């Protein structure tokens, strides 16, 4: 009876931990989609430090992606923390550059009073604190989780969709770097590139989201009904 | 800087195909990100962006 009770607690902790990882991925998608909207909708091309921060964002997302696909492991959170440190270094550099001169208006538009590099720093900080707190909660690691692929249901669908969306965003960011910067370093103050306009940008972002959820749904259906054999 | 995102795409392929050394590729990508940041910081042109 005690074993059954412990299995129940472990199983529930895995489901909760996965939900937190999915929420973290969706939060990162809001930030990545916002930056893509500025790039393709408003026509603000990313600066070199912005690209460093986007790389850090993808690094921060790698931990939850591995947790969801491969199972919950402390090492995956460690990778996220390192991603946050790399990206955070870029955002701190940019914040310091713009507070050095009191007359400096900052780079790019401000959102809710903060520039995007300040929001990026806040995201990296929250991500690091979140990973540290999840590392303190050891119950999900003891359950021997094998990832969402073995668990049928809406959690698998949302997880796969979010992972596909991050992948599409990473691909789009990478492909957009090529015409702007070629294979070398990007220009420090890039010229405004082509713009789809506000509505075009929103449609573009929503399009990537809808495509991701459709692909996630198809992938989840294709995986079928295999129940989680790895949970012990 | 394009190379940074090529490495991330390799990481995504590694995660999808469950490559054993994916974590090492992640570490290499993050190290490369820091190298690029360092190059940007030590560039002789005044860099404010």
Image: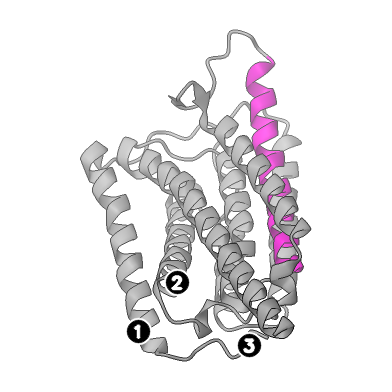
For the residues bearing labels 2 and 1, Cβ distance under 8 angstroms: no
- Residue A221, labelled with which disc? 1
> Under tag 2, what secondary structure?
helix
Which residue ends up furthest to the left in the rendered image? A199
Closer to us: B36 or B44: B36
Earlier-in-chain disc, 3 versus 1: 1
> Under tag 1, what secondary structure?
helix
Image point (42%, 58%), residue name? A172
Whether residue B32 can be seen here: no
Image point (70%, 77%), residue name? A6
Give the quadrant of residue A152: bottom left
Residue at image mark 2: A160
Say which quadrant the C terminus of chain A sits in: bottom right
Q: Left or right: where does residue A164 sit relative to residue B18? A: left
Q: Left or right: where does residue B43 sit relative to residue A110? A: right
Residue A91: say if magenta: yes
Residue at image mark 3: A230
């Amino acid at each position: 009876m005690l074993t059954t009770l412990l299995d129940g607690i472990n199983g529930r902790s895995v489901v909760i931990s996965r939900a937190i990882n999915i929420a973290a991925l969706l939060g990162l998608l809001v930030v990545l989609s916002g930056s893509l909207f500025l790039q393709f909708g408003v026509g603000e091309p990313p600066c070199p430090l912005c690209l460093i921060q986007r790389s850090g964002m993808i690094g921060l997302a790698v931990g939850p992606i591995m947790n969801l696909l491969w199972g919950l492991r402390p090492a995956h959170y460690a990778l996220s923390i390192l991603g946050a440190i790399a990206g955070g270094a870029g955002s701190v550099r940019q914040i310091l550059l713009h507070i050095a001169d009191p007359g400096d208006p900052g780079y790019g538009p401000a959102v809710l009073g903060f520039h995007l590099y300040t929001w990026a720093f806040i995201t990296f900080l929250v991500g690091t604190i979140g990973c540290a707190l999840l590392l303190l909660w050891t119950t999900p690691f003891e359950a021997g989780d094998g990832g969402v692929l073995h668990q049928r249901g809406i959690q698998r669908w949302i997880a796969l969709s979010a992972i596909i969306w991050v992948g599409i965003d990473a691909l789009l960011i990478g492909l957009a770097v090529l015409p702007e910067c070629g294979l070398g370093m990007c220009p420090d103050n890039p010229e405004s590139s082509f713009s789809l306009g506000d509505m075009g940008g929103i449609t573009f972002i929503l399009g990537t989201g809808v495509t991701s959820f459709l692909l996630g749904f198809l992938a989840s259906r294709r995986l079928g009904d295999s129940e989680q054999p790895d949970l012990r | 800087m394009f190379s940074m995102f090529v490495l991330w795409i390799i990481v995504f392929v590694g995660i999808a195909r469950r490559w054993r050394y994916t974590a090492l590729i992640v570490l290499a990508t993050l190290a490369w990100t820091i190298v690029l940041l360092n190059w940007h910081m030590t560039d002789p042109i005044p860099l404010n962006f």
